[in-house]
Image: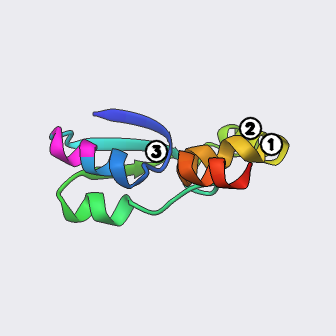
């Protein structure tokens, strides 16, 4: 089992499946979602908590530091292009 704050990006979701985790617990899909169904289709049990404190905390973080959110969810090349 693995716990994640947000929904896994494409690379992380692939690694969760490849490393044969049988379950992933996601704290927040409000701020970032996308690969839950793919993991389920691969046989991984996905539990979504939707922790209200975590949702508010990450939304505040992304609002205050959007440049870091780009790095997390897009990629470093996007961050460099924007600079």
The boundaries of the magenta stretch are 15-19
Marks 1 and 3 close (CB-CB < 8 Å): no
**Residue 60 marker:** 1
SS at badge 1 = helix
Viewer-proximal residue, 78 or 35?
78
Marks 1 and 2 close (CB-CB < 8 Å): yes
Q: Earlier in the sequence, mark 1 or mark 3?
A: 3
**What x and y, as percent, mark residue 51?**
61, 42
Q: Could you give the CA–CA distance between mark 1 and mark 3, rounded to whole angstroms?
A: 19 Å
Say which residue label 2 marks.
57
Q: Quadrant of the N terminus?
A: top left
Say which residue label 3 marks.
26
Marks 3 and 2 close (CB-CB < 8 Å): no
Residue drawn at x 40%, y 34% is 3
Residue drawn at x 37%, y 55% is 10
**What x and y, as percent, mark residue 15?**
26, 43
**What x and y, as percent, mark residue 78?**
60, 54
Residue 58 relative to residue 12: left or right = right
Counting every numbered tag in the picture gives: 3
């Amino acid at each position: 089992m693995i716990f994640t704050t947000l929904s896994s990006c494409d690379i992380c979701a692939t690694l969760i499946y490849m490393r044969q985790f049988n379950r992933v617990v996601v704290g927040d899909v409000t701020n970032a979602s996308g690969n839950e169904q793919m993991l389920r289709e691969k046989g991984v049990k996905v539990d979504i908590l939707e922790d209200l404190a975590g949702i508010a905390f990450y939304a505040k973080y992304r609002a205050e530091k959007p440049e870091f959110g780009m790095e997390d969810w897009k990629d470093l090349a996007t961050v460099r292009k924007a600079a």
